Amino acid sequence: QGQLVESGGGLVQAGGSLRLSCAASGRTFSRYSMGWFRQAPGKERDFVATISRNGGGTYYADSVKGRFTISRDDAKATVYLQMNSLKPEDTAVYYCAASFRVSPTGNPRDYNYWGQGTQVTVSS
């Protein structure tokens, strides 16, 4: 069973940038669609972005479109989330996840493995 470990979270001022990384163990990383989700206190886990197995397809939540970019490096078994123009409402714990599905999906129920999360806090 694979393991996902997120890093790169922290405290940043509004308008700033962060890059999250998610490193996967195991040799089958390229077989997974990968996604990023986030969960703010008292709220449900929300879809942020997803990328297909070959990196050819990326999809974003409307709230982050144009500001966030998901990418992957299969040689490093790592998926990234570049976050620019951050807003206080982006504050949440960010999770990466891996899905067996061929087509990337924004439904957290379609994901098979999850990381432990990394905190992102955006101050106003």
Image (spheres, grey):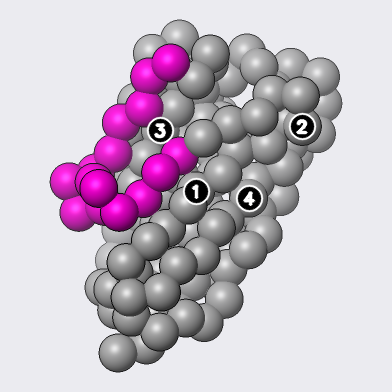
**For this rendering, which residue is in front, 18 or 118?**
18
Residue ID at (49%, 48%): 81
**Residue farthest to the right, as pictured:** 26
Distance Cα–Cα, label 1 vs label 3: 10 Å
Q: Residue 81 carries which label?
A: 1
Give the quadrant of residue 44: bottom left
CA distance for labels 4 and 2: 11 Å
- Res 50 label: 3
Which residues fall within the magenta stretch?
A: 56-70
The label shown at residue 76 is 2
Residue 62 is left or right of residue 95, and the answer is: left
Q: Nearer the viewer, residue 42 or 68?
A: 68
Q: Where is residue 6 in the image (x, y as percent from the top left)?
A: 65, 54
Observer-side mark, 3 or 2, equals 2
Helix, strand or loop at label 4? It is: strand
Whether pointer 4 and pointer 1 mark residues with C-beta atoms closer than 8 Å, the reply is no
Identify the amino acid type marked 2. Answer: Lys
Mark 1 is surrounded, within 10 Å at the Cα level, by few (under 14), some (14 to 19) or many (20 or more) other residues, namely many
* Mark sitting earlier along the chain (2/1): 2
Circle 4/circle 2 CB separation < 8 Å: no
Residue 62 appears anywhere in the view: yes
Q: Distance between the residues labelled 3 and 2?
A: 18 Å
Q: In this view, does 46 lie to the left or right of 72?
A: left
Name which residue type carries label 1.
Leu
Tell me: residue 24, above or below residue 102. Answer: below
> Horizontal placement of 25 versus 80: left or right?
right
